[in-house]
């Protein structure tokens, strides 16, 4: 039987039959028979194998960018095409939440919970491209975009003050002191990425804590860009507004999945891209479900030594700010990015990014450290 090689979490190769898909996305664990495809009827065995192989590769791709940095890319089945996923599997559930022409990308950083940092601009500085923000980071490292910021003129604060300092982060960060306070309307739903128990950046909403989904009222008007389906929400003008939660736009997020004793864990970076479309991405409610499936099913070091399914997840700035990349000795490779926004850049400049480096047992302390211990929690409420 023809084989399709999938990359294992630690950079090896797993042979999987073309009519199978791993029950754990990209894990190489026990496989299940894929859904039948009516197009294969009447074809020769050689042609059947090629068609089936192409179908698997189009819907699911797993590859290693460095030892301990694994990319999983998922696309929904095309119209008239059967899914490669077993019914009820994490892959099938993720595909069911996706719209046509969208792509879900997950970066698993093995052991990254102890080697993560926030990189950002200085007080008063304009946003910068991920390449510029990560030039001095030790490689290899996975990169995801950061939190919300003042991205255009005309936004206002809670007191009605007009905000014109482009690039100012919303909520406290580790790299600037001139942040804009989080609006009281959404403050209870904001979360933070903490490095060594200190705030690195703020974003939101907080989607999950310790494996449990956060109860966010996404049906409420304050999470809807057009509550009546036509008229823009008056809250859209506030800096750091969460009104786009109800629109199916491009998304990003970060998860931390710790072992049972809390000493080891992985960082999982998520992105959903759709060629800049604001109708083929995901609502935040669906993104909450998708990121939990992605975090829980990641092939992770934490699960092998402790428990899985206990991830905490924070939504990051989406739309045109969505970004995933890998920094190596030869530079920054962009994997996916959002499209759109007023900057006019192909890749939107942002005030901060999150970088995470794998920490594999065999490496010990041989490689330069990146930051420290990362955790996700509610944003400061005082």
Image (tube, rainbow, N blue to C red):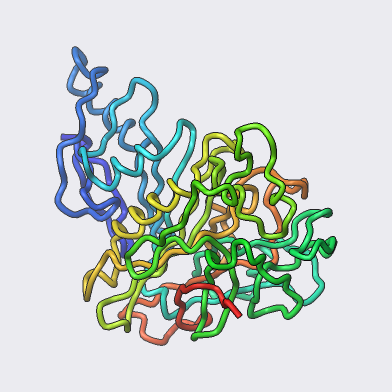
- Quick one: 57 or 35, which is closer to the camera? 35
Q: Is residue 299 left or right of 228 when viewed as pictured? A: left
Left or right: 287 in relation to 265 = right
Q: Quadrant of the N terminus?
A: top left
Give the quarter of the image for residue 156. Answer: bottom right
| Residue 307 visible (yes or no) | yes
Residue at 45 percent of width and 49 percent of height? 287
Between 358 and 263, the one lying in front of the other is: 263
Residue 277 in the image: above or below residue 91: above
Residue beneath the point at 58% across and 55% down: 323
Residue for point 69% across, 40% down: 232
89 lies left or right of 295: left
Q: Residue at x 30, y 43 (%)?
A: 93
Is residue 262 placed above or below 16 in the rendered structure? below
In x, y percent, where is residue 194?
A: 52, 78
> Which residue extends farthest top?
42
User: How many marks overall?
Assistant: 0
x, y percent for residue 7 = 31, 54
In percent of width and height, residue 133 lies at 67, 68
- Residue 116 pos. (x, y %): 49, 76
Quadrant assignment for the C terminus: bottom right
- Looking at the rendering, which quadrant does residue 175 occupy? bottom right
> Is residue 26 shown left or right of residue 35?
right
Q: For this rendering, which residue is in front, 150 or 373? A: 150
Asked whether residue 69 is in view, the answer is no
């Amino acid at each position: 039987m023809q084989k399709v090689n999938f990359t294992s979490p630690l950079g090896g190769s797993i042979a999987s039959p073309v009519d199978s898909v791993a029950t754990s996305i990209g894990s190489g664990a026990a496989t299940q028979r894929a859904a039948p495809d009516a197009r294969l009827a009447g074809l020769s065995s050689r042609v059947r194998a090629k068609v089936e192989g192409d179908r698997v590769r189009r819907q699911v791709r797993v590859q290693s960018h460095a030892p301990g940095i694994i990319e999983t890319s998922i696309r929904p089945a095309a119209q008239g095409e059967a899914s490669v996923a077993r019914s009820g599997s994490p892959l099938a559930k993720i595909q069911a939440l996706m719209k046509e022409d969208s792509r879900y990308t997950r970066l698993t950083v093995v052991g990254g919970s102890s080697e993560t940092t926030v990189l950002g601009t200085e007080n008063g500085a304009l946003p910068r491209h991920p390449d510029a923000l990560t030039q001095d980071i030790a490689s290899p490292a996975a990169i995801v975009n950061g939190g919300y910021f003042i991205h255009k003129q005309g936004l206002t604060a809670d007191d009605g003050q007009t905000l014109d300092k482009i690039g100012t982060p919303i909520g406290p960060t580790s790299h600037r002191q001139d942040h804009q306070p989080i609006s009281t309307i959404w403050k209870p739903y904001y979360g933070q990425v903490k490095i060594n128990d200190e705030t690195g950046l703020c974003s939101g909403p907080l989607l999950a804590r310790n494996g449990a989904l956060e109860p966010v009222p996404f049906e409420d008007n304050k999470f809807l860009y057009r509550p009546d389906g036509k008229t823009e929400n008056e809250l859209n003008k506030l800096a750091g507004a969460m009104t786009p939660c109800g629109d199916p736009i491009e998304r990003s997020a970060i998860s931390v999945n710790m072992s049972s004793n809390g000493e080891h864990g992985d960082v999982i970076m998520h992105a959903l891209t759709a060629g800049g479309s604001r109708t083929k991405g995901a609502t935040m409610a669906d993104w909450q479900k998708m990121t939990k499936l992605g975090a829980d099913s990641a092939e992770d070091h934490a699960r092998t030594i402790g428990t899985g399914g206990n991830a905490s997840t924070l939504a990051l700035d989406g739309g045109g700010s969505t970004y995933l990349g890998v920094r190596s000795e030869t530079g920054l490779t962009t994997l996916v990015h959002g499209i759109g926004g007023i900057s006019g850049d192909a890749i939107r400049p942002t005030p901060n990014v999150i970088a995470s480096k794998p920490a594999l047992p065999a490496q010990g302390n041989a490689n330069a450290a990146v930051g420290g211990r990362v955790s996700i929690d509610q944003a400061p409420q005082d």
